[in-house]
Amino acid sequence: MEDNEIKKIVRDQYGKIASYSSCCSPTEEPIAAPSCCGPTESINELGYSIEELKNLPEGANLGLGCGNPTASADLKEGEIILDLGSGAGIDCFLAANKVGISGKVIGVDMTYQMLDKARENAIKGKYENVEFRLGEIENLPVADSTVDVIISNCVINLSTDKKRVYQEAYRVLKPGGRVIVSDIVLLKELPDKIKRNMKAYASCVAGAMLKDDYLSVIKDAGFTIDEVTEQTSCGTPSVAHKAETGEIVDVDTIPKEKLEQMNAFANSIPAISIKVRALKPN
């Protein structure tokens, strides 16, 4: 399948999720993503605290992440932050609270519906230091050497050209800048059936790389890897996709036996979430 076709599938699926206002599990086949959690049940597991989330605009947390990159980013007042694949804005708003009004946060997303939702959330939350831009993470709408910190949460695995993503990240970072990414990687190769399943791709599974290969891509872009932390995968999904139509449905509508099968299958997939901290040399 061509890269542009994959991008369209991913864009369409996340547009539906933005409209549904919750997270996704990929199919009813079953194939389930280890990255997709219900918006409340796995908060601590992802690294978010109740205190962090309680003042965010309603609808900012769609439960789509696999970690909390802002928790270990050491964000400082006045810094400029870039979020790759910003979704409804959860990590942008958390970052904005840390960098203050003297700082700035830029969220980039390729999905119109997500951008609309994020901008609405910024208005509701009165975030004057957050800006959302339409763009692809392989071709960032950001000038060279203008960003202090890049964050991303379970998004880069969706790219068909991860090498280009990290080259772009290197380009826009200031010398001495840092990248903190939570993402999905594989511990071993996936079966061909899952690799070819586009719902599994859109759900952060089929497009994931082997862990060592992923880290090599970061190093080859010029970064020095400072820290890699393995994290546990997420829990039970709150919604699912119908394989035939792509329709998003609440898991309460799925028979208990089928849901148990989906969860068992998800737990058997050799994927984990990791958090990577990398530095651009001075």
Image (tube, rainbow, N blue to C red):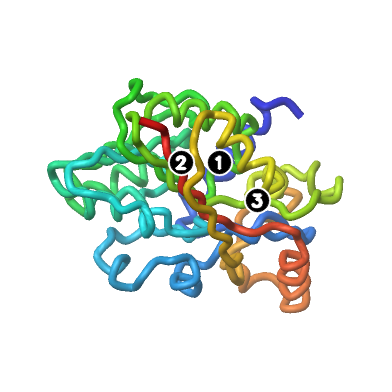
Q: Which residue is mark 1?
A: 156
- Mark 2 falls on what kind of element? loop
Tell me if label 2 and label 1 are in contact, CB under 8 Å.
yes
Q: Residue 131: image x %, image y %?
A: 27, 37
Is any atom of residue 139 visible in this view?
yes
- Tell me which numbered mark, 2 or 1, is placed earlier along the sequence: 2
- Tell me which numbered mark, 1 or 3, is placed earlier along the sequence: 1
In the current view of this chain or complex, which residue is farthest to the bottom? 256
Tell me if label 1 and label 3 are in contact, CB under 8 Å.
no
- The front one of 22 and 231 is 231
Q: Residue at x 56, y 63 (%)?
A: 231
- From the viewer's perspective, is 32 left or right of 60? right
The CA distance from mark 2 to mark 1 is: 8 Å
Say which quadrant the C terminus sits in. top left
Q: Residue at x 33, y 73 (%)?
A: 50
Say which quadrant the N terminus sits in. top right
Q: Residue 4: image x %, image y %?
A: 64, 25
Q: Which mark is residue 185?
A: 3
Q: Residue at x 25, y 47 (%)?
A: 122
Of labels 2 and 1, the one closer to you: 1
Rendered view: 223 above or below 91:
above
Amino acid type, callout 2: Gly
Q: Residue at x 39, y 41 (%)?
A: 178
Query: Badge 2, how many Cα within 10 Å: few under 14, some, many 20+?
Result: many
Amino acid type, callout 3: Val
Q: Which residue is mark 2?
A: 85
